[in-house]
Structures are given as structure tokens and as C-alpha cells.
Image (tube, rainbow, N blue to C red):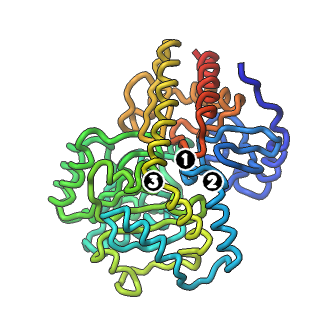
Amino acid sequence: MQELLSSTKKSQELYKKACEIIPGGVNSPVRSFKAVGLEPLFISKAKGAHIWDVDGNQYVDFVNSWGALICGHTHEDVADSIQKALTKGVSYGASHEKEIELAQIIVDNFPSIEKIRFVNSGTEAVMTAIRLARAYTKRNKIIKFEGCYHGHADSVLSMSGSGVTTLGLPACAGVTKNTASETMTLPYNNISTLETTLGKYPKEIACIIIEPVIGNCGVILPEENFLKCVRDLTKKHNCLLLFDEVITGFRLSLGGAQAIYKITPDITILGKIIGGGMPIGAVGGKKEILDLLAPLGPVYQAGTLSGNPLSVACGIATLKLLNEDSYKRLEDLSSMLFEGMQKINEEKGVKLQINRMGSMFTVFFCETRIYDSKSAKKSNTKSFSQFFQNMLSRGIYLAPSQFESNFISTAHKEQDIKKTLEAYKESISTII
């Protein structure tokens, strides 16, 4: 049996202080641990595949800054790149050569991207992408899918995944009815509903925005030919296809999900890994669309810290570490974990659903197949909460929500996977 963790007294004390001056004590809702019946941990340091809390407890980390740290924490090359950039200045508010280098790396790996604009977050990138789509098509309405989370911009918060699902929020206060009315939210993996909707509004839909592999409602994969059908329908109805690859971009392959599924979107939204853990976002796509951005075109977008030299340096260093061997390692480790969990489930007679795509995975406490937001919501969140607590007490740090993805990094080692499987076996045994 694995040794259980010691006290988290210091984290509890810090949380109490944080609640006095920070709403909910956290700066992002899912960090609150509310969905798993705990108070949040406060992290003091991280290295490789591990993090330590302020009480000195060590964990195998499967959150990895929500997928951004594909090479693990404080990789030497990445840390060095930040140090070198720091000596030259934190921010310029002006152009610099490294922006071009990062842009070129992305363009070289994503054939659908001819030009790219850097912003400061995935949310900001989504806002810009939708604005571009509306300007290009001269239409107003957009279509998104249930369970897909595209940041917290007003137009895309309806029936989102991530924290909205975790906290059970039916809608977001402060979003006007007029804004909400321009967004239609449809079931994921359901082509007939999409086809009907496009037929009903033949000249009103500016774009369809989608996570090609859902990561923010837990991992949910597209059914066979679903993405192809979405692409075909956008062409038929002369609207744009926006791939939100904030999570999947450089996570599933060098060319993201679109390279795996062989789909060419009109606009690609990136974040996470392209900043190597530093704040960044990006909008890329066809020249004729991107050239609508100011100063060339009429679509205004600006940001004081866009293309920040520290974020750009961190991103370049991270992307240079990725190659075929990196993705083979990620696949090998992920397969080892997945197959090990499945074997334990069979031995214990546990009917859980484990959805996996490359180095992304979610354990759903549900007996039936998970293929969209509604099927995911059939999961037993109380059982997941107990599972999370069991794993955490054994030194395994998972995403603190049933409706989130977990991530493996190249820094994970076989012994980390073996420790996780041992913890998984003990944790499951206490629930069934």
C-alpha cells in the first residue's frame, strides 16, 4: 500500500487568507477544488513530472498547467530561454525578431496557417477569430457545440464545458440576451442537427467553432467522419470553420488534431503549448482572412503584451524540443497508463469509461460510452470526487473535476506510471 500524504495545513491557512481578498480564494474557478469536496492546494515548486505543495507533499502531476507543459516543469532548455530573454527586457510594447521565429515554426507545422497573429490568451484568440469570421462573411450568427469550451468571451459561454459544467452553471450572468441570441449551441457528434440548423439559417451563419477533440468536458473524441462532415457543410453553406486547438495544437501532433484527422480549417486558434507555460494565444489561417486585421484591414485587435518576449522565447524553446520521438514517448506512456487502468477495471469488475487521445485522458465514472456533453454528464460526480481524493492522498495530482482532461508530459517516466497504477488500484478498491 502506498504511503498517504501528510497534512495540508499550510494550504488551508493560505486559502483562508486568499478568500479574504480574492473572489473564492482563486484566480480561476476550477482551481477551487469545489467539485471534489476539498480546499485547493497551494503549490510551492515544480520539476519534471512532479509538483510540491507548501506543506512539502510531492505529487505526480497530470495537470501540467492544463496541458501547456508538454515537456514537463522547468525543462532546462525552456528555463534557460526565459533567463536569456529576461536579461534583454520583460516587455517592449514593440516588435521583435523572435515573434517572427515562433510564427514561422507554427506556419511550418500547420499547412492551414498562412499568417498568424499573437495575442495573450486562448479567450482573446477566440474573440479575434470570431470577429474575423464575421467580417469576412458579413454574417453575424455562430454555431458552437455543447461541451466545447472556447474561453470566457460572452458569445461562446453558452453550454460550455470546463468550469461551467463543473460548477453547474446553466448560463453566465452578465451576458446580454442579444449577444447570446447570435450563438447557436448544438450537440457534438450529431451531424443531422447541424445540417438542419444550417438549412434553417442558410445565409446567417458566419462560422462554426469547434474543439476537434473536446478537452474541456473531459476528453471526448469525434465520431468517424464527423469532422469531415462539418467541414463539408461549412463549404456548402459558405461559412468558415474555426478549429479551437488551444489544447490539441502541438499536443496530439506537430500539426495538431487537424493533421491527424486530415481536416483543413479556415482559422486555427492556438495557445497553451505554443507559450510553453507562459501566457499566449494565437489566431492563424488563410492570408485573405488574416489580412482583414488592422493595420491592413478593418478588423481591430490590439494588445500591449501581445508577442511578449518571455512568452515567445518560452514557446520557441518548447516547440524545438518536439519531434517524432517526443510523440512516440507520449504515446507509449499514455498507452501504458490506459492499458494498466483497463486491466485493473477488468480485474475489479469496474465499468468505467476511460477516454484517451494521445497524451490526453479522462476517467469517467459512467458505465455507458461517452460521446458528447449529455453522455458525459451521466457520470457519477460523487464517485469521481472520492476517487480524486483517494488519488491525491497517494501523491497523484489529477484535474480536480470530472469534466476536465489530464495530460502526460515527456518528463513522466515509467515509474511515475507504475506509481499511478498502484494508486489507481487502491483508490478504485475503496469506492466499489
Please name the amino acid that badge 2 sits on.
Ser
Do the residues under discs 1 and 2 have CB atoms within 8 angstroms? yes
Left or right: where does residue 248 sit relative to residue 306? left
Cα distance between the residues tagged 1 and 2: 9 Å
Do the residues under discs 3 and 1 have CB atoms within 8 angstroms? no
Disc 3 is placed on an element classified as loop
Residue visible at 53% across and 13% down? 348
Residue visible at 72% across and 29% down? 393
The residue nearer to you, when weighing 45 against 322, is 322
Q: Which residue is mark 1?
A: 163
Q: Position of residue 245 (x, y in %)?
A: 41, 56
Locate residue 167: give its quadrant: top right
State whether residue 413 is above or below residue 72: above
Disc 1 is placed on an element classified as helix
Please name the amino acid that badge 1 sits on.
Gly
Left or right: where does residue 111 sit relative to residue 335? left
Left or right: where does residue 50 sit relative to residue 323? right
